[in-house]
Amino acid sequence: MVVLVIIGIAAAAISVSAWPGQRQGLRFEADRLVQLLVLAREEAQVRGAAIRFEADENRYRFLILRERQWIPIDDPDLRARPWQQAVRIQVVRPDGGQVVEFGRDAVDVPFVLTLRSAEAEVNIAANGLGAFEVAR
């Protein structure tokens, strides 16, 4: 899994090299985040514990539910990371929830995660079955 994440991050860096400025940076962040969301989903199933994505304008991180508390996950690939630029996050789910969370089940709640910077916007759509797509 770690190799796939590294390959995905490298491919994301190469694929966005033709995009200009902030849009390019935000697209890189979205591509990297997709790879990490895939990994977090798989980890939730393997560990048998819910994993949550949490973000603010400066950074993002993944938390795991242990003894009824959300704690930072102890995985080096899912560590807290800073955004390259200030990013605002919006989560849209059909059930009205505002969090991205993966559980033990093979089916999750689908969502659209919108990343916004001062001059750009990128969406990450998840179908709830493990497929993620980055859209402009």
Image (tube, rainbow, N blue to C red):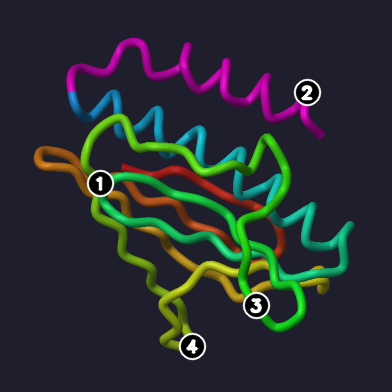
Query: What is the CA distance from the residue labelled 3 to the residue labelled 2?
Result: 30 Å
Query: Residues at badges 1 and 3 in contact (C-beta under 8 Å)?
Result: no
Q: Earlier in the sequence, mark 4 or mark 3?
A: 3
What's the CA distance linking mark 4 and mark 3? 23 Å
Q: Amino acid at mark 3?
A: Gln
Taking 64 as reference, is 1 left or right? right
Read off the residue under disc 3: 69
Q: Nearer the viewer, mark 1 or mark 4?
A: 1
Q: Are marks 4 and 3 in contact (CB under 8 Å)?
A: no
Magenta residues, start to end = 1-21
User: Predominant secondary structure in magenta?
Assistant: helix
Q: Horizontal and vertical percent for residue 86?
A: 21, 41
Seen in the picture, residue 127 relative to 87 is either above or below; the reply is: below
The residue lying toward the viewer, choosing from 77 and 26, is 77
The residue lying toward the viewer, choosing from 85 and 116, is 85
Residue linked to disc 4? 95
Q: Residues within 10 Å of mark 2 (few under 14, many from 20)?
A: few
Nearer-the-camera pick, 74 or 106 = 74
> Of discs 2 and 4, which sits in the foreground?
2
Amino acid type, callout 4:
Asp
Q: In the image, what residue occupies the spot 71% across and 45% down?
A: 39
Compare marks 3 and 2 and give the one earlier in the sequence: 2
The residue identified by callout 1 is 87
Mark 2 sits on what residue? Answer: 3
10 Å crowding of disc 1: few (<14), some (14-19), many (20+):
many
Q: Which of the marked residues, 2 or 4, is nearer the chain's N terminus?
A: 2
Residue at coordinates 38% horizontally, 19% vertically from top-left? Answer: 16
Gap in angstroms between the C-alphas marked 1 and 3: 26 Å
